Amino acid sequence: MKILVCGKRVPMTGGRIVLTEDEQAIETRHLGFTISPHEECGVEEAVRLVEQHGGESVVLTLGPPEAEEQLRDQMALGVDRAIHLVTGGEEWDPQATAAAIVDAIRADEAASGPFDLVVFGNESADSGGYQVGIRVAHALGRPAVTGLKGVAVEDGRVRCEQEVAGGRDVYVVPLPAVVTVKEGLNLPRYPSVPGRMRAKQKPVAATTPDRPQARLRLVRLAVPAGQGKQAEVLGRGPEAAPAVVEVLRGIGVVA
Amino acid sequence: MILVLVEHEGGATTELTSQALAFGRSLAGDEPVDCVACIAPSQEIATDELGPGTLHLAEHDAYASLAPDAVAATVAGVVERTGARAVVAPGSDTGNDVLARVAARLDQPLASNCVAATAGEPARVTRTRWGGSLLEEAELDGAPLLLTVQPHAVAADVAGAPVAGVERFTPVLADADLAVRVADRVEAAGSGIALADANVVVSGGRGVGSTEGFAIIEELAGLLGAAVGCSRAVTMAGWRPHTDQVGQTGTKIAPELYIPCGISGATQHMAGCKGAKRILAIVDDAEAPILAGADYAVIGDLHEIVPAISAELRKARGS
Ligand SMILES: Cc1cc2nc3c(=O)[nH]c(=O)nc-3n(C[C@H](O)[C@H](O)[C@H](O)COP(=O)(O)OP(=O)(O)OC[C@H]3O[C@@H](n4cnc5c(N)ncnc54)[C@H](O)[C@@H]3O)c2cc1C
Ligand SMILES: Nc1ncnc2c1ncn2[C@@H]1O[C@H](COP(=O)(O)O)[C@@H](O)[C@H]1O
């Protein structure tokens, strides 16, 4: 099997989001970076599927030069190679992102054969557009199943499980296909030291696509109001228990 | 005309659809608001709140097995026939999925999870990022404008009226539109209280320390008739299953009372409990960000505090 996983570099914001002065971005000077947990599960699934069925796994990101860090992180988990669509650091809207990913997939498939499975996060961690995977699937004419917590490949088909109220819906679609996945699909492994060493040597194919005119354009970011309450401290240590029960009574959750 | 995608369950429109309708009506101004709904031949839906516009009611076997591409093809067809200026859908999993498919078909931009929108050239939207921890004001092109509505961000306007008319039709669907559909349903074995619907949730974070550490969390939850939740630090450590995780990439909860224990209050965790009416945090760090999002707090070691609260609850019940 040949499998592609797409992931987006995002900052690891902690307890509070701080914006740059021009309100165009999150202030990231003191932050680390990662990809969405959904996408991390996608990477783990791709590595497992290749361990199971043989083949090759590839990761792709569209992002600034620094996003190579995330590609190496994913290759440390066992992914074979990476495709880096290098940007100037500005965010691309979902339509433009999808178009660039489609071009990259077509180029890679022309050179080294079709991807059986292309894996996306259900939604990106930062912009949460819920659409890049679906747009790519449509452009490639492949079925897309979204929000998956279970993926299994057998006999040229992929069995997909979606969590819904009261159970799981099962979809079965032929390969090649596109899936978007959610955290909980699996428990991703931690990178090993040899894995990290090997990742340094693995190939990253970098290209610089042209950015089309955005059709969903950021004007400014804003931190939602009204979160700035400060808790009333009921006490310190176990001595606070009676005060807690008093509050629970007041709220009506204890008779 | 502005077209609203109706999602329904057991013949009734969903709560998130009512919110999308309210959003669509305020975006429309004086323009008419029509609805589109997809039902299997065995289904019916109530139409007395979907007006005063027209309901475009598509009937097909395929909808019984969800078939998101079939729904998207149907919506795109109604757009083409009516020249709708905008399509608004609920920001549910299925609403976001279907509208993304409509956007791909029509090659138009889509603004998902909006909390506000104003018509114009270009339209202006405010949408959520980071699961609701951040807002983005943006300009949106598109003919039609495509938007989904962030759940529980706008009031579900009750000012609906009976529909002016129902236009029933059977869409012509391509084979490709039927490729993705539900083939089977596996019922959950799950016992216990569903996290998403629980009235009280007690969660543990990294501060709980281990799988066994959750015994005191479960004990307190049991006494309160609460569901047990956790932070991502806990699921990553393998102490609890991901189905217990509260947050941006876990379950979104909306209980009357939320009790996070040993949780620092990262924005991605808070994104999952914004819907909680009240939050009582138990944490040993008086500077933890969770205190800025909580109503009440007890500062100290949860391994002492949580059992003390359980004991106090037992005492109060006289057992
Ligand atoms: C894209 C993305 C999505 C994410 N999604 C989620 C999500 O859905 N849900 C989620 O929870 N996280 C999510 N995270 C992770 C999140 O950023 C935090 O890393 C995580 O929430 C931290 O968990 P925690 O609060 O348990 O651990 P910590 O941040 O380590 O906090 C532990 C807290 O417990 C306190 N403590 C320690 N010992 C004790 C004790 N004995 N008694 C009392 N207090 C004690 C500490 O002082 C500290 O405040 C996501 C991250 C990213 C980047
Ligand atoms: N810049 C990017 N680089 C690589 N993959 C991306 C990028 N943006 C989005 N994706 C993928 O598309 C998914 C959905 O993104 P979105 O439509 O923004 O919610 C993400 O989870 C990623 O898998």
Image (tube, coloured by chain):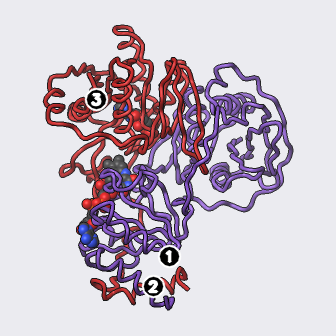
Chain colours: A red, B purple
Q: Is any atom of residue B268 visible in this view?
A: no
Are circles 2 and 1 on residues that touch, CB within 8 Å? yes
Q: Is residue B228 at all visible to an observer of this figure?
A: yes
Q: Is residue A228 left or right of residue B159?
A: left
Residue B240: quarter of image: bottom left
Q: Which residue is mark 2?
A: B313
In the rendered image, residues at marks 3 and 2 fall on the same chain? no
Picture quadrant of residue B286: bottom left
Q: Could you classify mark 2 by the number of other residues whose Cα lies within 10 Å: few (under 14), some (14-19), or many (20 or more)? A: many
Relative to A38, is B74 on the left or the right? right
Towards the viewer: B285 or B201: B201
Q: Chain of mark 2?
A: B
| Residue at the extreme front | B319
Q: Chain of mark 3?
A: A
Q: Which residue is mark 3?
A: A87
Q: Amino acid at mark 3?
A: Thr
Disc 2/disc 1 C-alpha distance (Å): 9 Å
Q: Verify CB contact (< 8 Å) between mark 3 and mark 2.
A: no
Q: Position of residue A27 (x, y in %)?
A: 25, 51
Tell me, for residue B224, which label it has, or none.
1
Which chain is home to disc 1?
A: B
Q: State the CA–CA distance, disc 3 to disc 2.
A: 57 Å
Splitting the image into four quadrants, where does ligand 1 fall? bottom left
Query: What type is the residue that disc 1 sits on?
Result: Leu
For the residues labelled 1 and 3, the Cα–Cα distance comes to: 52 Å
The image shows residue A237, relative to residue A170, as above or below, that is below
The number of numbered discs placed on residues in the rendered structure image is 3
Q: Nearer the viewer, mark 3 or mark 2?
A: 2
Q: Position of residue A237 (x, y in %)?
A: 27, 83
Against B126, residue B285 (above or below) is below
Indicate the secondary structure of the residue bearing disc 3.
loop
